[in-house]
């Protein structure tokens, strides 16, 4: 009986330690999200209305939504495939070796490298006056892939061109999330396959791929969500529109339709609903993948 109060005191200490984090989540994530989405249900005068949802019928908004989904899907698939190949190559290295440590460290940094810094890096590299772009122009390739003057613009200043800087952080993120699943493949499974007369092809089609599939598709969904919610890099490269996050900025700044700034709340709700669906699919696959990792 003397130690009966210790578990309750420990639980109280745990909750007390989580209080600062909970306050941070509420003040800087939950409340702003609720206010942003909730604003879509009110007019400029403050009365409840559904008129703001007319923004979803705008053909340009619909095109930008499809463009956002397409950009996120393309960069997610490319990032997942390339990142998986990198993870496969890393299996041949020592877990505590210098190469593995360097790649893990670089992936941790590059996965979080974005925004204005990333945009500036690509502007000075493949922008209109970028180093590589100017070198190609001097070599006589004025309409090269980075500076297609026939359309009057430069690749990275278009929605399609955003896939280049997006892959810069998508691939390292895939390495971080998928590498633990690759390391979970046990050598005994390959030995058992060889003992039973199986080939390397048989191992990957009957054992490796089925085991890694939940983790791979879970990471793929995570990459899609990461690209879908990205804003800062696109905002630094594209002046107006093209993807939903930039459309939200346009409504807030009254650059799209004057007097309809609350349409940003409707677009925010559209993004939230999309992200809820995506993260729900991710949680399903993550639970299945955790069985193999354990």
Image (tube, grey):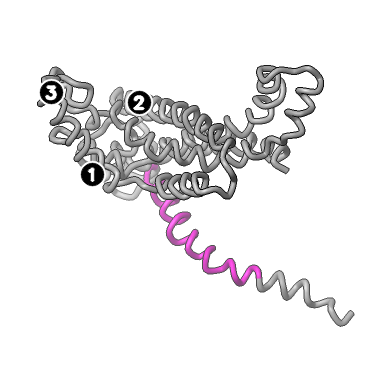
Disc 1 target residue: 120
Neighbourhood count class around disc 3 (C-alpha, 10 Å): few under 14, some 14–19, many 20 upward: few
Taking depth in this image into account, of 232 and 184 the one nearest to the observer is: 184
Q: CA distance from mark 2 to mark 1?
A: 23 Å
> How many numbered markers are drawn?
3
Instruction: Name the front one of labels 1 and 3.
Output: 3
Query: Is 265 drawn above or below residue 17 in the view shown?
Result: above
Q: Residue 134: give x, y in percent of width and height.
A: 13, 31
Q: Residue 43: give x, y in percent of width and height.
A: 32, 44
Query: Is 106 drawn above or below residue 240 in the view shown?
Result: below
Circle 3 SS class = loop
Q: Residue 293: give x, y in percent of width and height.
A: 69, 41
Circle 1 SS class = helix
Q: CA distance from mark 2 to mark 3?
A: 34 Å
Mark 1 vs 3, N-terminal side? 1
Screen quadrant of the N terminus: bottom right
Mark 2 vs 3, N-terminal side? 2
Mark 2 vs 1, N-terminal side? 2
Taking depth in this image into account, of 54 and 8 the one nearest to the observer is: 8
Residue drawn at x 61%, y 72% as measured from the top left: 16
Disc 3 target residue: 139
**Residue 38 shows up from this direction:** no
Instruction: Name the front one of labels 2 and 3.
Output: 3
- Inspect the magenta stretch and tell me whether residue 16 lies in it: yes
Taking depth in this image into account, of 190 and 47 the one nearest to the observer is: 190
Disc 2 target residue: 67
Q: CA distance from mark 1 to mark 3?
A: 24 Å
Residue drawn at x 68%, y 29% as measured from the top left: 211
Where does the magenta region start and end?
14-40
């Amino acid at each position: 009986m003397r130690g009966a109060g210790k578990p309750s005191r420990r639980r109280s200490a745990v909750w007390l330690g989580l209080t600062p984090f909970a306050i941070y989540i509420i003040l800087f994530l939950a409340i702003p999200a609720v206010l942003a989405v909730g604003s879509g249900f009110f007019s400029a005068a403050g009365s409840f209305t559904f008129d703001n949802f007319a923004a979803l019928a705008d053909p340009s908004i619909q095109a930008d939504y499809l463009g956002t989904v397409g950009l996120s899907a393309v960069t997610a698939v490319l990032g997942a495939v390339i990142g998986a190949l990198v993870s496969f190559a890393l299996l041949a290295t020592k877990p505590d070796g210098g190469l593995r440590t360097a790649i893990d460290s670089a992936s941790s940094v590059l996965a979080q490298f974005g925004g204005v810094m990333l945009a500036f890096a690509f502007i000075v590299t493949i922008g209109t006056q970028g180093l590589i772009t100017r070198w190609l122009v001097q070599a006589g390739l004025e309409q090269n892939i980075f500076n297609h003057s026939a359309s009057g613009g430069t690749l990275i200043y278009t929605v399609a061109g955003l896939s280049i800087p997006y892959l810069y952080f998508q691939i390292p993120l895939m390495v971080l999330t998928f590498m633990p699943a690759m390391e979970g493949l046990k050598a005994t499974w390959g030995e058992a396959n060889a003992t039973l007369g199986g080939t390397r092809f048989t191992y990957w089609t009957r054992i490796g791929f089925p085991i890694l599939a939940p983790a791979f598709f879970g990471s793929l969904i995570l990459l899609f969500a990461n690209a879908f919610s990205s804003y800062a890099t696109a905002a630094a490269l594209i002046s107006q529109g093209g993807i939903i996050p930039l459309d939200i900025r346009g409504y807030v700044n009254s650059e799209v339709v004057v007097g309809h700034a609350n349409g940003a709340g409707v677009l925010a709700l559209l993004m939230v609903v999309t992200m809820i669906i995506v993260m729900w699919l991710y949680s399903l696959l993550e639970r299945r993948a955790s069985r193999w990792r354990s």
